[in-house]
Image (spheres, helix red, strand yellow):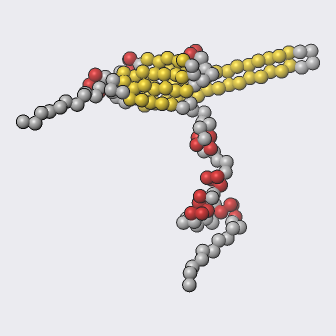
Amino acid sequence: MSLVKFRNRIRPFGGLATRDFFDTDDFFGNRLWNGPSILDDFWNGNSSEPALNIKEEDDKFEIELAAPGFSKKDFEVTIDNGCLNISAEKSDSKEEKDDNYTRQEFSYNSFSRSLQLPETVKEEDVKARYHDGILSFDLKKKAEAKKLKPKKIEIA
């Protein structure tokens, strides 16, 4: 004799209230995974936060933030209490008037990101540049934080 699990496919509230915790078929086939969700933008890379790369070297950190379509004047960058704050705001409007109509178009884009800096960063030596849609930062490390090269010790 074998046991067969009973599956009732008609569930109130889409099965959210009556779901069996161990029902893996239902878990992976659930609309929270396969259907539209508030997390879709995050998982599909459509988030309103721009992509960010951080690279650590022996004497500095390099940060690259992808922000195409902005210009240097659109950015505001501050360091406050060990936190690097990056924000940008851009708006554009066009208006076309004719005898019979007026057409007006506008757009608005903005974002904000904050990064907690390690204590090893020299806040006074942070450099930023914007080129080809990439906002780059060089954050130099304090002398005591730089990695020393390994010293080979001879065994006597």
Furthest residue in direction left, as rendered: 156
Residue at 61% x, 20% y is 70
**Pick the front one: 8 or 150:** 150
- Residue 10, given in percent of the width and then of the height, sits at 71, 67
**Pick the front one: 78 or 71:** 71
Residue 8 placement: quadrant: bottom right
Left or right, 18 with reference to 93:
left
Residue at 33% x, 26% y is 58
Furthest residue in direction right, as rendered: 100
- Residue 42, given in percent of the width and then of the height, sits at 58, 40
- Residue 93, given in percent of the width and then of the height, sits at 74, 19
Q: Is residue 74 visible?
A: no
- Residue 101, given in percent of the width and then of the height, sits at 89, 20
Q: Pick the quarter of the image with the C terminus.
A: top left
Furthest residue in direction bottom, as rendered: 1
Residue at 70% x, 64% y is 12
Q: Is residue 132 visible?
A: yes
Residue 87 placement: quadrant: top right
Q: How many marks?
A: 0
Q: Pick the quarter of the image with the N terminus.
A: bottom right
Task: Tell me if residue 51 comes above or below residue 31 in the rendering.
Answer: above
Task: Tell me if residue 27 comes above or below residue 48 in the rendering.
Answer: below
Residue 108 placement: quadrant: top right
